[in-house]
Amino acid sequence: MIFFENNKITCQDYTVSNEKFELVYNIKLELLETFPQPKIEDLGKYYESVDYISHTDSKKSVIDKLYQVVKGYALNQKLKLINSFKTEEKNILDVGCGTGDFLLKCKNNGWNVVGVEPNSNAYSLAETKLSKIKTSKIFSDITEITSEKFDVITLWHVLEHVPNLSEYISKLKYLLKPNGVLVIAVPNYKSYDASYYKQFWAAFDVPRHLWHFSKKSIQLLFSAQQMNVVKILPMKFDSFYVSLLSEKYKNCKNNFVKAFCIGFLSNLKAMGTKEYSSLIYVIKKT
């Protein structure tokens, strides 16, 4: 927390609005909260950008192409992770399924898939990809799912986006089978690349990211809902991609060499601290 003054830091929205927001430190939860948080009905406008790549399949820029290459590798790693779980059946819910690539990967490997995607553009792309799979379903909001229970629920860089955090976690718990597994991937503001780039750290991504987590904050939030973090895994590629965007925000230009060096150094330091740029939390009910 060495880059915070008076328990807060000012960041800018470099993707859409150029507006400035504060990150306020919640000492009790070791959580950073974006302030002011946009009203729920206004959140959508902050995602209306061709640069918001998780809602598109764009391969126009160099960064887009790098993102798509890394995404292909990450999909295989995600599948490997969920296949390692001992489940009653193979029913998976992917919340924030984006353009549907992970759902398609799961379906092609024997999983029964359900997705949630509120963004209309990403929803349409996902629906098109999964249109030939009669058993697949995609919802625009998690509240539309009322009766189904799942062996695995995944949120890949989604929890930081949701309003009403405690209520959302409670809903996830409700949808999970008694022996089910919840997988949460979020950025880690205690990583080296976060402390290096400070207010320019791309993973702050205000105001789309409403919350900013540490390992302790995740553990506290879920233990309050009688759920335990049973394993924490690194997402090593995130430090490189985030550093590349952070360089662009800080210096108004791409610097691939510098970004690679910072990303590499962040992973190197994390070998000792375990504070990787992004972390995957495997969570179960107590």
Image: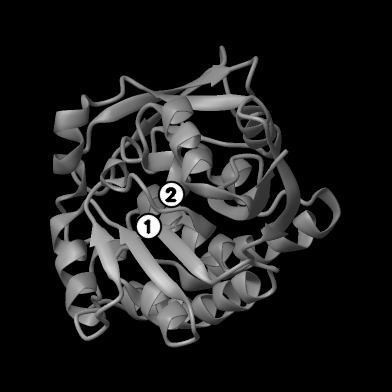
User: Is residue 74 depicted above or below 196 in this figure?
Assistant: below
Amino acid beneath label 2: Ala
Front one among 177 and 82: 177
Query: Picture quarter containing residue 6?
Result: top right
Residue 173 location (% of width, % of height): 53, 40
Expressed as whole percent of the image width and height from the top left, the position of residue 196 reads: 60, 45
Q: Is residue 74 shown above or below 216? A: below
The residue to which callout 2 is attached is 202
Left or right: residue 126 versus residue 204 is: left
Q: Quadrant of the N terminus?
A: top right
Q: How is the image coloured?
A: one colour
Give the left or right position of residue 198, taking residue 45 as reference.
Answer: right
Rendered image quadrant of residue 219? top right
**Residue in the image at 52% along x and 27% along y:** 32
Assess disc 2: are there few (<14), some (14-19) or many (≥20) residues with their C-alpha within 10 Å of its C-alpha. Answer: many
| Circle 1: residue type | Lys
- Which residue is more in the foreground, 61 or 169? 169
Q: Are marks 2 and 1 in contact (CB under 8 Å)?
A: yes
Q: 236 or 269, which is in the foreground? A: 236
Name which of mark 2 and mark 1 comes first in the sequence. 2
Above-or-below relation of 122 to 169: below
- Residue 252, x across and y down, in percent: 32, 54
Question: In 3D space, how far apart are the residues under numbered discs 2 and 1 (Cα atoms)?
Answer: 9 Å
Location of residue 260 in the rendering, given as x and y in whole percent from the top left corner: 57, 70
Res 277 visible = no
Tag 1 residue:
248
Residue visible at 17% across and 42% down in the picture: 44
* Mark 1 crowdedness (10 Å alpha carbons): few <14, some 14-19, many ≥20: some
Q: Nearer the viewer, mark 2 or mark 1?
A: 2
Q: Does residue 44 appear anywhere in the picture?
A: yes
The quadrant of the image that shows the C terminus is top right
